[in-house]
């Protein structure tokens, strides 16, 4: 009579003897991603892709810039599979990847594990652009938000241009004839954030391409000797608010990680009260409350009733109801 094999107790070490952390991410990530690139978060509605799986100093982790969540491949599996205990996480990996460790007939060590994946250094992408004059159609588009050519050039540290051609790492990127394509040039660091406002995400098109470091703030020269200041999270929102309120700056996104200690110290030295303004949707509010509670700032967002009209930010509100509506709201909040 054959003896029953003793069940193998799964451990983190047994799993990582056979596969790499990156292979685990690949097995559980629901859509394609590039290592050290930016993609959509699998955990929330992510209209502005802000999720990354990255390797630095030999360690592979994920970070969600939209809400600050981060962790290793095991944290990722826990979240994506709703696994509560660590043994359950390991069992999910063993089953999904066909490792068969618990069956006592483990799969061979992966080729990539044998080759010891080299540490990938995050590449700083080279952006090169050919500019053109704003067309009447482009200026009309900006005009729907109450903005004109002077607003696009007003800020010292970020200026808006119309893009004719775009190269990334010297590779020409195709832009459709007549397609809206704008470049936000961050002048102090000579970096670009490229904006395709009419991109169709259902077709896999990206609205944003960028080589701007996450902690790059802009509109900072507006924050000088202010009683109250607003920190928002986009160039459009900055320009709209700055038409009404002088003391406004902006971050690259809504996350706590986008605010450096140096920038925060500067703002606190130059403003008596600071309002942090993210989007008013669920993800934006979560990010905003996280920032305001941890940093001792005040919370501000557009009214919730606008969500029923698909509006969750200042630019969207300006487009629907005009700048006067925002001005009245800021007066009600005793900011103006």
Image: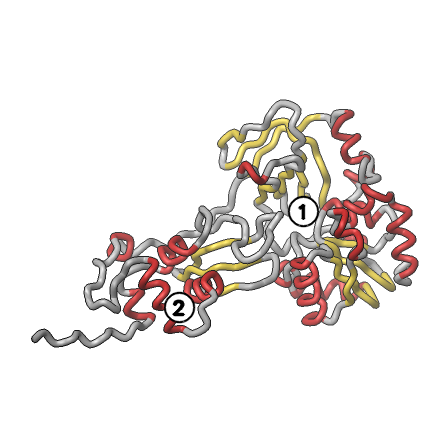
Q: Which residue is drawn at 73% across and 47% down?
A: 310
Tell me which corner region of the image, top left, top right, bottom left or bottom right, holds residue 138.
top right
Task: Decide: few, some or many residues near mark 1? Use Cα within 10 Å; few <14, some 14-19, many ≥20.
Answer: few
Q: Residue at x 57, y 52 (%)?
A: 50
Q: Which image quarter is the N terminus in?
A: bottom left
In screen coordinates, is 172 left or right of 27?
A: right
* Dot 1 or dot 2, earlier in sequence: 2
Residue 89's disc number: 2
Secondary structure found at label 1: loop
Foreground label between 1 and 2 = 2
Percent position of residue 49, x then y: 58, 48
Q: Which residue is drawn at 37% across and 73% down?
A: 87
In the rendered image of this protein, does residue 170 appear above or below residue 287?
above
In the rendered image of this protein, does residue 188 appear above or below residue 57?
above
Percent position of residue 80, x then y: 47, 61
Q: Which residue is drawn at 46% across and 72% down?
A: 84
Q: Which of 254 and 81 is in front in this view?
A: 81
Q: Nearer the viewer, residue 268 or 80?
A: 80
Task: Decide: few, some or many residues near mark 2? Use Cα within 10 Å; few <14, some 14-19, many ≥20.
Answer: many
Question: Label 1 belongs to which residue?
Answer: 188
């Amino acid at each position: 009579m054959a003896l029953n094999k003793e069940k193998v107790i799964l451990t983190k070490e047994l799993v990582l003897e056979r596969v790499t952390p990156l292979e685990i991410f690949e097995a559980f990530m629901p859509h394609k991603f590039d290592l050290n690139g930016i993609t959509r978060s699998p955990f929330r509605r992510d209209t502005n892709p802000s999720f990354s799986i990255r390797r630095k100093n030999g360690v592979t982790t994920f970070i969600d810039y939209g809400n600050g969540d981060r962790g290793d491949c095991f944290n990722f599996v826990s979240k994506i599979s709703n696994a509560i205990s660590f043994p359950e996480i390991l069992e999910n990996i063993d089953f999904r990847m066909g490792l068969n460790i618990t069956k006592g007939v483990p799969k061979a060590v992966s080729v990539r594990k044998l080759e010891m994946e080299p540490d990938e250094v995050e590449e700083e992408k080279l952006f090169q652009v050919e500019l053109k004059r704003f067309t009447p159609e482009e200026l009309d588009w900006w005009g729907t938000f109450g903005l004109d050519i002077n607003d696009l050039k007003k800020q010292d540290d970020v200026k808006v241009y119309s893009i004719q051609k775009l190269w990334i790492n010297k590779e020409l990127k195709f832009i459709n004839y007549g397609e809206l394509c704008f470049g936000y040039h961050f002048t102090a660091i000579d970096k670009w954030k490229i904006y395709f406002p009419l991109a169709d995400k259902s077709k896999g098109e990206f609205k944003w391409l960028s080589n701007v470091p996450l902690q790059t703030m802009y509109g900072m020269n507006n924050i000088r000797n202010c009683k109250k200041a607003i920190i928002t999270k986009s160039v459009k929102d900055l320009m709209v608010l700055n038409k009404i309120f002088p003391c406004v700056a902006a971050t690259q996104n809504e996350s706590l990680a986008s605010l450096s200690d140096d920038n925060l110290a500067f703002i606190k030295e130059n403003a008596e009260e600071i309002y942090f303004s993210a989007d008013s949707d669920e993800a934006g509010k979560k990010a905003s409350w996280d920032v305001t509670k941890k940093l001792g700032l005040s919370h501000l967002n557009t009214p919730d009733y606008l969500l029923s009209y698909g509006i969750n930010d200042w630019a969207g509100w300006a487009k629907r109801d005009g700048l006067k509506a925002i001005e009245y709201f800021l007066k009600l909040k005793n900011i103006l």
